[in-house]
Amino acid sequence: MSLKILTLPYDMIYEMIHHLTICDLIHFCQSNQSYYQLFQDDYLWQLTFEQHYAETHMVLCQSMTWFTMIQLCYGLVILKQKFSINHSIKSLYEFKYIDLAHIKLKSIPHVLCYLNQLQQLHLENNKLKLISPKLGHLNQLQKLNLSYNQLKSIPPELGNLQQLIEFDLSGNDLTTIPSELGNLHQLQTLYLSHNQLKSIPLELGNLHQLYHLVLLHNQLTFIPPELGNLNQLRKLFLYNNQLTVIPLELGNLHLLNYIDLRHNPLHATKQQIQQLFNLNHFVIISM
């Protein structure tokens, strides 16, 4: 039967299937390889999608094929069902906030990478080991929480998130972070605590809007002098690392009002450190 369908004109095929929903069509083409090949045709998908546009109301990237667009729509449906999200396809595609924390996720749902209206994405306390580079396409994202997963690396493409204000990578297994994070020029808060970092890239000194930098509970032996360029920095947490010296350039942080250097094997005395900074609050213990 499938071979006969393949030989029919498009208009006749369309008349046979136009009453099906988009989800029905996806299941239809998944049921048989011949149907799948048939529905690779953009024209047929376009006819079908236009028929159901009122149902989906999705504004989709023009660079996608129609088949990819329908797969995306289907992915949204699955996302709704799997995580019991009580929103229409339209509102889900236009979502600005998604919270998938604490649900033992092992991989990020692929469809999230296409929700380009998203402003906040919470994926903390899961079992993620890899992050898709396509998350870097979320050009409206302002807050991204990937804390307390099992990440060993971060794709450099996340440096493309030009609207990002808060980024939380605490509680992972990171030994390095990509220098491209220095391109996050709107970033105000960066959490990197409870990792295995031995160094941080000097490019972090380009984050001129950064207010809070949290690096406690790592294995840092060196702080790049370029951090002295963070002229908006208010709070710097370096508790429990392996630092022996503090670069003099940090004395340029005139807005800094709190720095935590406890539990580092510093060579300098407390008085010497205090002379370096003009701080309202200063903590340095167990030198």
Image (cartoon, rainbow, N blue to C red):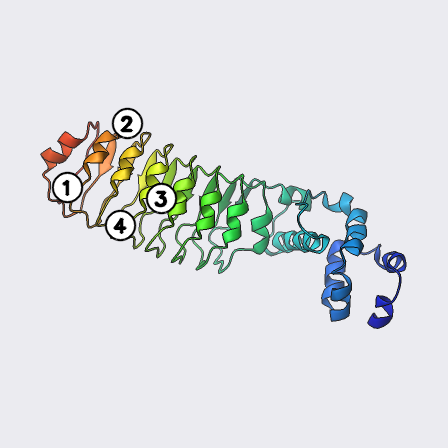
Upstream in sequence: badge 4 or badge 1: 4
Residue 32 coordinates in the image, percent (x, y): 75, 70
Mark 1 residue type? Ile
Look at mark 1 in the image and give the residue it sits on. 285
Upstream in sequence: badge 1 or badge 2: 2
Which dot marks residue 255?
Answer: 2
Mark 3 residue type? Tyr
Asked if residue 75 can be seen in this view, the reply is: yes
Q: Are marks 1 and 2 in contact (CB under 8 Å)?
A: no
Upstream in sequence: badge 3 or badge 4: 3
Q: Nearer the viewer, residue 205 or 210?
A: 205
Q: Nearer the viewer, mark 4 or mark 2?
A: 2
Q: Residue at x 34, y 47 (%)?
A: 192
Mark 4 residue type? His
Q: Nearer the viewer, mark 2 or mark 3?
A: 2
Look at mark 4 in the image and give the residue it sits on. 217
**Callout 4: helix, strand or loop?**
loop
Residue at mark 2 to residue at mark 3: CA–CA distance: 19 Å
Residue at mark 3 to residue at mark 1: CA–CA distance: 22 Å
**Callout 1: helix, strand or loop?**
loop
Look at mark 3 in the image and give the residue it sits on. 191
Placement of the C terminus among the 4 image quadrants = top left
Q: Are marks 4 and 2 in contact (CB under 8 Å)?
A: no
Residue at mark 3 to residue at mark 4: CA–CA distance: 11 Å
**Callout 2: helix, strand or loop?**
loop
Q: Nearer the viewer, residue 182 or 112?
A: 182
Residue at mark 4 to residue at mark 2: CA–CA distance: 24 Å
